[in-house]
Image (cartoon, rainbow, N blue to C red):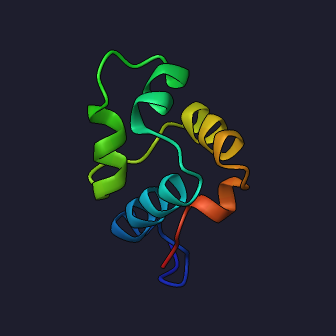
Amino acid sequence: MSSCMPTVNMAATGSNIKALIKANGIKVTEIQNICGFNTPQSIFKWMRGDALPSLDNLVILAHILNVTIDEIIITN
């Protein structure tokens, strides 16, 4: 694999998800309900950059936040 291949910057992506949620005035519990999670922990993990949303959840998140997936993910 070439060293010039892009990689996901998880911390920056998490900060971006957090900023997009705040900018859109959406509550974490709303995203939790739409994604079908029992608790908001997964969303807090995304926002901290500890985990990335699954592809399905990225599609949902992009729709909720009215952005493209490319506008959510920050790469190095």
| Camera-nearest residue between 2 and 10 | 10
Image vertical order of residue 68 relative to residue 36, above or below = below
Q: Which quadrant of the figure has residue 61? A: top right
Q: Position of residue 76 (x, y in %)?
A: 48, 79
User: Which residue is drawn at the image coordinates 33% and 67% (left, top)?
Assistant: 11
| Camera-nearest residue between 20 and 6 | 20
User: Which residue is drawn at the image coordinates 33% and 15% (left, top)?
Assistant: 38
User: Which residue is drawn at the image coordinates 35% and 53% (left, top)?
Assistant: 47
Q: Residue furthest front?
A: 25
* Horizontal side of residue 69 vs 36, given as left or right: right
Q: Please give the count of numbered marks on the rendered protein.
A: 0
| Camera-nearest residue between 7 and 66 | 66
Q: Position of residue 29 (x, y in %)?
A: 40, 29
* Horizontal side of residue 10 vs 59, given as left or right: left
Image vertical order of residue 64 relative to residue 12, above or below = above
| Camera-nearest residue between 53 and 41 | 41
Q: Position of residue 33 (x, y in %)?
A: 48, 20
Q: Position of residue 73 (x, y in %)?
A: 55, 62
Q: Which quadrant of the figure has residue 15? A: bottom left
